[in-house]
Image (cartoon, helix red, strand yellow):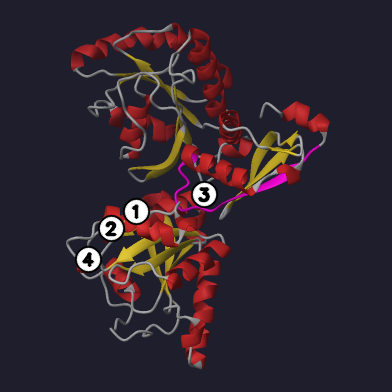
């Protein structure tokens, strides 16, 4: 918990239907969470890295609470809000308490405010839905909750800049490890899919030799670049690798050495860009390369290059299912269609790389991690094996790149592969771990320890 306090984590809390998801989307810069007028639409907590000016931080959204059949009760709402807020507050460095300026101060606002005060975390009260200047005067009604009040309209982007100026100033300083140790991004794929052309387009220079003859890039070439600006800019080294051929076609010592270097580039990278050829489509050999990425548990972006050559009757929506069918174990990876030749979507590929880099190095808040696993178990119970059922007591993240999570259970050998896959998918849905490998390590603990920690606290 203390380690997380030094992280730049902003948690959004508040009762249902005050606009938490709208604020989350506004700060994240895209429609990640569902926004709907109906109370309780956001069922899952979301987490995303946000860039605000030169600042980076992790943003956490906590959803409203409903009963399984969609009907709400006061007890369910209050208990659910309290439980989710406690999980978020456990790891937050700054809190945004969102209220509805049009509805006025609600008893649940006072309850959450009291909970935050006990935590002693820097907090800003967001009087949301201030859709015009005439509403701003109503914000003073919330001053009694004890936090600086900011009238805001998340949907109309009113007052957000003033709020965020104070928020980023309250975030703790954090050492940017990528300055000394840049993250490595390997560009891999079959020969002649356009890897060198992509690097040239990305860097707007001819740093890498480009040729129509397969196999021109004989060795791996390292090129530094960065995303963002200021002290929080993320620094990378781009590695353009030789095309990976099937072993039967590796017909020289140089080719064999290039293959070894390419595999080593995958192993030593933080993020791998798997490049495919639009015209040739996902092939069995692409699947083998993807399997190599999965073998080393590397973060991955799938880049479908030469989209300028796609025929009119082929759409991206049609292409994706065929790709996933060829390599279903990469279905969690972002897929970007681009053209290194004309520059189509090249900027989007950089955003995808940066997003995956953020995910592979993320530290999941412990309280929210346990809450997510508990919710997953409540939704789908572990299967009974010979009359015994798996019980999850407590989880903690023990590593990054890849994300490694130790889960303490009653009996480790009761874990079934299908249920492990389900838990990983549940974590992806909760935390948005696009392209990031997740490894769960199950460990049995004593019954005494289990009883003490079965609530995940």
Q: Is 283 positioned to the left or the right of 262 in the image?
A: left
Q: CA distance from mark 3 to mark 1?
A: 22 Å
Callout 4: SS: loop
Badge 3 vs badge 1, beta-carbon distance below 8 Å: no
- Dots 3, 2 in contact, CB < 8 A: no
Is 78 rendered above or below residue 202? above
What residue is disc 1 on? 351
Magenta run includes residue 332: no
Q: Name the element at disc 2.
A: helix
Q: Nearer the viewer, mark 2 or mark 4?
A: 4
Residue 440 in the magenta stretch? The answer is: yes
Task: Calculate the distance from the C-alpha at mark 1 to the C-alpha at mark 2.
Answer: 7 Å
Disc number for residue 347 = 2
Q: Answer few, some or many: residues within 10 Å of disc 3's Cα (few below 14, many 20 plus, some between 14 and 19).
A: few
Please report the bounds of the magenta region as a residue range: 431-445
Examine the rendered structure and indicate whether residue 44 appears above or below residue 139.
Answer: below
Label 4 environment density (alpha carbons within 10 Å; few <14, some 14–19, many ≥20): some
| CA neighbours of label 2 inside 10 A, class few (<14), some (14 to 19), many (20+) | few
Which residue position is annotated with label 4?
310
- Give how far across and how far down residue 228 sits, in percent: 35, 52
User: Which numbered disc flags the more N-terminal residue, 3 or 1?
Assistant: 3
Mark 1 or 4: in front is 4
Give the residue number, with chain letter if any, for mark 3. Answer: 175
Residue 167 seen anywhere in this rendered image of the structure: yes
């Amino acid at each position: 918990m203390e380690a997380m306090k030094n992280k730049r984590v902003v948690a959004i809390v508040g009762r249902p239907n005050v606009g938490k998801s709208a604020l989350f989307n506004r700060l994240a810069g895209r429609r990640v969470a569902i926004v709907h007028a109906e109370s309780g639409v956001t069922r899952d907590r979301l987490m995303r890295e946000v860039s605000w000016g030169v600042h980076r931080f992790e943003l956490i959204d906590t959803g409203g609470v409903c009963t399984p059949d969609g009907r709400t009760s006061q007890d369910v709402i209050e208990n659910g809000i309290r439980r989710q807020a406690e999980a978020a507050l456990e790891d937050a460095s700054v809190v945004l308490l969102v209220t509805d300026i049009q509805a006025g101060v609600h008893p649940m606002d006072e309850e959450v405010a009291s909970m935050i005060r006990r935590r002693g975390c820097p907090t800003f009260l967001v009087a949301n839905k201030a859709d015009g200047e005439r509403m701003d005067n109503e914000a003073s009604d919330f001053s009694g909750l004890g936090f600086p009040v900011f009238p805001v309209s998340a949907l109309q982007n009113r007052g957000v800049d003033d709020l965020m100026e104070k928020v980023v100033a309250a975030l703790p300083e954090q050492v940017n490890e990528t300055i000394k140790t840049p993250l490595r991004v390997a560009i891999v794929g079959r020969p002649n899919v356009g890897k060198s052309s992509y690097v040239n387009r990305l860097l707007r220079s001819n740093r890498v030799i480009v040729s129509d003859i397969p196999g021109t890039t004989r060795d791996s070439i390292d090129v530094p670049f960065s995303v963002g600006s200021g002290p929080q800019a993320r620094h990378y080294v781009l590695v353009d690798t030789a095309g990976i051929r099937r072993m039967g076609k590796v017909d020289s010592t140089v080719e064999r050495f290039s293959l070894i270097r390419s595999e080593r580039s995958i192993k030593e990278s933080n993020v791998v860009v798997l490049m495919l050829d639009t015209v040739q489509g996902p092939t069995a050999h692409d699947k083998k390369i993807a399997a190599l990425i999965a073998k080393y548990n590397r973060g991955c972006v799938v880049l479908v290059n030469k989209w300028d050559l796609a025929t009119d009757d082929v759409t991206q929506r049609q292409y994706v299912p065929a790709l996933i069918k060829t390599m279903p174990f990469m279905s969690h990876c972002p897929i970007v269609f681009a053209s290194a030749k004309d520059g189509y979507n090249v900027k989007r590929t950089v955003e995808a790389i940066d997003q995956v880099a953020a995910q592979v190095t993320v530290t999941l808040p412990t309280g929210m991690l346990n809450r997510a696993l508990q919710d997953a178990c409540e939704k789908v119970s572990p299967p009974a094996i010979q009359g015994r059922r798996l019980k999850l007591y407590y989880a903690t993240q023990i590593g990054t790149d890849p994300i490694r999570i130790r889960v303490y259970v009653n009996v480790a050998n009761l874990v079934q592969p299908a249920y492990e896959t389900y838990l990983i998918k549940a974590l992806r849905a909760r935390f948005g771990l696009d392209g990031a490998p997740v490894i769960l390590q199950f460990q049995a603990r004593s019954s005494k320890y289990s009883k003490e920690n079965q609530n995940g606290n």
